[in-house]
Amino acid sequence: EVQLVESGGGLVQPGGSLRLSCAASGFTFSSYWMHWVRQAPGKGLVWVSRINSDGSSTSYADSVKGRFTISRDNAKNTLYLQMNSLRAEDTAVYYCARAAAGNWTPLNHWGQGTLVTVSS
Amino acid sequence: EIVLTQSPGTLSLSPGERATLSCRASQSVSSSYLAWYQQKPGQAPRLLIYGASSRATGIPDRFSGSGSGTDFTLTISRLEPEDFAVYYCQQYGSSPGITFGQGTRLEIK
């Protein structure tokens, strides 16, 4: 069974940093592209970032470019999102999601999310 | 960036009725790289439809998707109580990444 478990969320002050992790199991992690998607309280889904299967290619939404860094450790079956210079508008539940295969495929498995709150 | 606009914002129907949800793209979606997701309160989204019309694993056949180019539709043929949720369309065929529609809330009338 595919499982994705996010961790690392919490309360952080504006301008601060946080690193999210997503532990994957039940599939060959190194074969799949992975994504981060966020959802502000009461709002819709917003794509944040994606990384290819070997970590050599990444993409970001304009709203986080230059502040967030996606990475992965295929030996540890773990996806990461390093978030710097956090703003109030980054407050959201952050989901990691697995693509069905490579690029140009939908997100067919999701974690339960971790809440990030940016507030003083 | 491709912008997806969903309509209506809220749809009020009764169990047993047919639901039709719309998703319009600001430009053509490549090779029908269009998906639909269902999200219930406190839960992660679930993939329903991909490639505009293919059902994901385990999705009941009362859910169907159609459309191409810039206009797409999700149809639920006969609503079950568990179908009342928020539905999002998503395109995954353009760079730099994925975009979602703003969602349609399907509520019990």
Image (spheres, coloured by chain):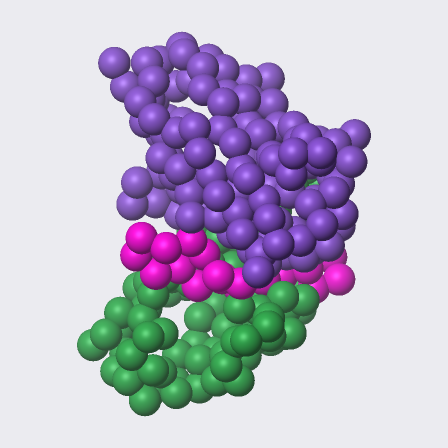
Where is residue A105 shown, x and y percent of the image?
Answer: 69, 55
Specify the quadrant that holds the N terminus of chain B.
Answer: top right
Please indicate whether residue B101 sits to the left or right of residue B70 in the image. left
Res B38 visible: yes
Residue A88 in percent (x, y) is at: 34, 22
Percent x, y for residue A100? 67, 57
Name above or below for residue B48 compared with residue B94: below
Q: Position of residue A10 (x, y in %)?
A: 34, 26
Among the 4 quarters of the image, the one containing residue B77: bottom left
In the image, B18: left or right of A57? left
Residue at position x 30%, y 56% from top?
A: B41
Q: Which chain is purple?
A: A
Q: Is residue B45 magenta?
A: yes
- Residue beneath the point at 43% across and 76% down: B20
Judging depth in this view, the residue of B101 and A67 nearest the camera is A67
Quadrant containing the C terminus of chain B is: bottom left
Q: Residue at x 48, y 43 (%)?
A: A5
Q: Colour of chain B?
A: green
Q: Magenta includes A112?
A: no
Q: Which residues are magenta?
A: B27-47
